[in-house]
Image (cartoon, rainbow, N blue to C red):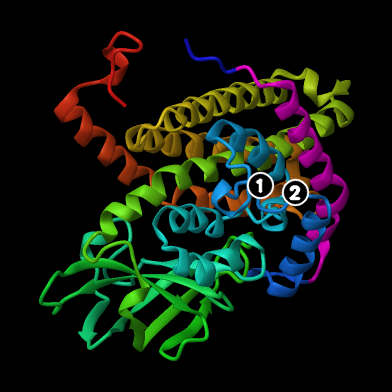
Amino acid sequence: MIDFSVPPELTALGERVRQFVIDTIVPYERDPRLTQHGPNDELRQELVELARKEGLLTPQASPRFGGKGISHIEQSVIYEAAGWSTLGPVAMNCAAPDEGNMYLLDKLTTDEQAEEFLKPVLDGAVRSVFAMTEPGGAGSDPSQLLTQARRDGDSYVISGRKWLITGANGAGTWIVMADVVDDEKRSGPTLFLAKGDDGGIVIERVMNSMDRNYVEGHGVVVFDDLRVPAANVLGEVGEAMRYAQMRLAPARLTHAMRWLGAASRAQHIALEHAKTRTAFGGPIVDHQGVGFLLADNEIALTQCRLAIWYTAWVLDQGHKGRHESSISKAFVSEELFKVVDRCIQVMGGIGVTDETPIEMIFRDIRGFRLYDGPTEVHKYAIIRRMKHVGSEAARVPGSHTV
């Protein structure tokens, strides 16, 4: 039997995080340093220090670095609470892409690599990026990788162009995916570690996008003969695809956790509005046209929370959870988008203005249907698995392999 009950101490921590976000972080949503390209580094650092002061910085840090090593179930409560504001995870250093990068670096770095590339990210001193997506190649299908790394003595020289690299501008720790093409010992897609101020990393521009919840937005990057010591290979040469999946399965889920918090806030605002806004003789919440929208939202939010918890439970059992994370990512991203869209409908004209944060949440959450793989790519992966193992839903509960 799966026990989805939340221990009282975890509930209390979630409430503490939520109150911290409401009292301390939400006021920064009007800060001019929250720009078209997301919060800038100055704002991020100020928020990080507020979370540090409250003892809420990097709650997911592993015991390897003095953290508590919280489970995925524990993450689901904490991240949902932090996600009440899109700035909450930024303050607590558990936002994408850093949270997923920290997870991967913890799994793969040597002690020397961790000291140089991971610890500054855990401490909130620098940001990190995962540089994989390319204009004409790697993205949802990373096998189309065009960026190349050539061996030169004790180094690799990386050349290529990437885009939609979240947080590239000003990032300190870089994880770069490149295809090793001429190493006589081993070749193939490989992850490399680099520093943001290394010669050869050129930030061509920051792209204009409809979302603004990620620090410094999404960049176009050119690797102009970036020289990386062979000691900076992350893991093993040729294993980047496997490592990317190692990172993406839990990262998809933590995305869902954070956005569940944002959508829940939109629902809260819409409900309070519907209880006080009157039309045709009474509050609009009493009209089925509005009330049913809010009821549909409540159903969807509950279903999303259960999907997240189940997938978190699967990961906590030590399973890879790729299939389950694809299902949760596809389902939750689509449902939460509908939730926020219905909230705007309930709000009426005020819903498309910045008088409430729902408009901002709507613009930001649209990208969630694309982050870490579009819904259609996840459906493709789901049906491919079904062709080989059949439908999990048709099996006796507990009899399937996860």
Label 2 element class: loop
- Residue 10 inside the magenta-drawn segment: yes
| Mark 1 surroundings: few (<14), some (14-19) or many (≥20) residues within 10 A | some
Q: Return the x and y of residue 118 as percentages of the image width and height.
A: 53, 64
Residue drawn at x 55%, y 59% is: 98
- Write down the quadrant of residue 183 in the picture: bottom left
Q: CA distance from mark 2 to mark 1?
A: 6 Å
- In reply to whether residue 30 is colored magenta, the answer given is yes
Query: What is the chief secondary structure element of the magenta stretch?
Result: helix
What kind of residue is marked 2? Leu
Q: Which residues are magenta?
A: 5-32
Residue 167, x across and y down, in percent: 55, 69
Residues under numbered marks 2 and 1 in contact, where contact means CB atoms less than 8 Å apart: yes
Q: Please name the residue that numbered disc 1 is placed on.
A: 59
Residue underneath mark 2: 56
Q: Residue at x 79, y 67 (%)?
A: 46
Direction from residue 323 to residue 2 in the image, left or right = right
| Nearer to us in this view, 41 or 29 | 41
- Look at the numbered disc 1 and give the secondary structure of its residue: loop
